Amino acid sequence: MTLNRRAILLACTAALAAASATAQTAEWPAKTLRIVVPYPPGGSSDIIARSISQVLSESLKQSVIVENKPGANGNLGADFVAKADPDGYTMLLCDVGALAISPSVYTKLSFDPSKDLRGVTMLAYSPHLLVVHPSVPVNNLKELVAYSKKNDLNFAVTATGSAPHLAGVALERASGARWQYIPYKGGVTAIQDTVAGQTQVLMNGMLATLPQVQNGKLKVLGVSKATRMPLIGDVPTIAEQGVAGYESGTWQGVLLPRGTPDAVVQKLNKALISAIRAPEIRSRLAGQGAEVVTMTPTEQEQFFAKERARWASVVKAANIKLD
């Protein structure tokens, strides 16, 4: 085969591949979509995924299923999505803040969140609530700090190296409190054990924790937001109680495998924003303490980078490392 014929053949092959990719993008979605939640059922990410799945299905005119793949502080499910085909049919809905922490905490990570995943949009923000079991005789952060210095306290965390764990570490270091961290495999079990009194202190996303405060099974001492939340009455922020500038929370967002076509990402961004902003969903989430927050793919990538830098300093100061 001559050089010219070979060049023509290669050009034709490339053109056909590009045309095929363009056609597939134009037809997207043409089959069932899957939302992977890398945590057990019942947590903040799971609640939001199941809240939007039906509306998203109606918008895209395709079935949307929610699949829980818990393990390794969310990294098992995240790795699964990172290595999935970049065709827009497998998406990750998780705590983006927690995902940004993983590169600093884990010495061995089977994927690189910043290189193997790309942002689509943020969906919601839920501040952390600082709560205790009702048997703990304190009513604010100052009293909790004083009590912790004279009594043993177990602090339940959704997983070692998770966002609530590092939020607890940051609070402990800033306030002078003392407690022992007890890791769990998800927020639901951490909440359940604190309700049962097996652990005494918990910091977790408001969306999943508020119901236990409302039914009196947990006592709230503070909220990790810059401003108070009328939903929980006159509960002061943690910053108001002596930890200036303190703010943390759970940021739910959607990511796709790196390499997913821009056109698909934009279509999904539009559909997800429309779903999360649906009046009935926005109202339901607001009643549970979650604020709808949406972003462009670029804005989410920038947020991810800032969170990664922010928590890296906390991880280094606390010397938290996992294999």
Image (spheres, rainbow, N blue to C red):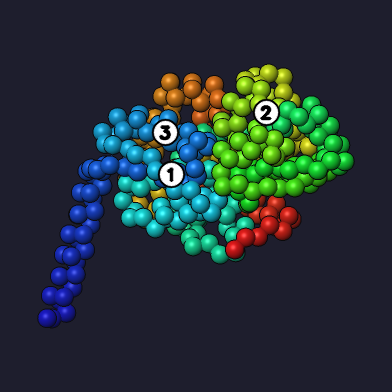
Q: Quadrant of residue 67?
A: top left
Judged left or right of residue 4, residue 313 is right
Image vertical order of residue 111 relative to residue 38, above or below: below
Q: Which of the marked residues, 2 or 1, is nearer the chain's N terminus?
A: 1
Q: Residue at x 69, y 35 (%)?
A: 197
Q: Secondary structure at mark 3?
A: helix
Residue picked out by circle 3? 50
Q: Which one is nearer the viewer's eye here, 74 or 175?
A: 74
Q: In the drawing, what numbered circle is on residue 213?
A: none
Q: CA distance from mark 2 to mark 1?
A: 27 Å
Amino acid type shown at disc 1: Asn
Q: CA distance from mark 2 to mark 3?
A: 25 Å
Residue picked out by circle 2? 218
Q: Residue at x 16, y 79 (%)?
A: 3
Q: Position of residue 70 (x, y in %)?
A: 48, 48
Q: Nearer the viewer, mark 3 or mark 1?
A: 1
Judged left or right of residue 16, residue 143 is right
Q: Position of residue 185 (x, y in %)?
A: 56, 47
Residue picked out by circle 1? 68
Q: Residue at x 60, y 44 (%)?
A: 158
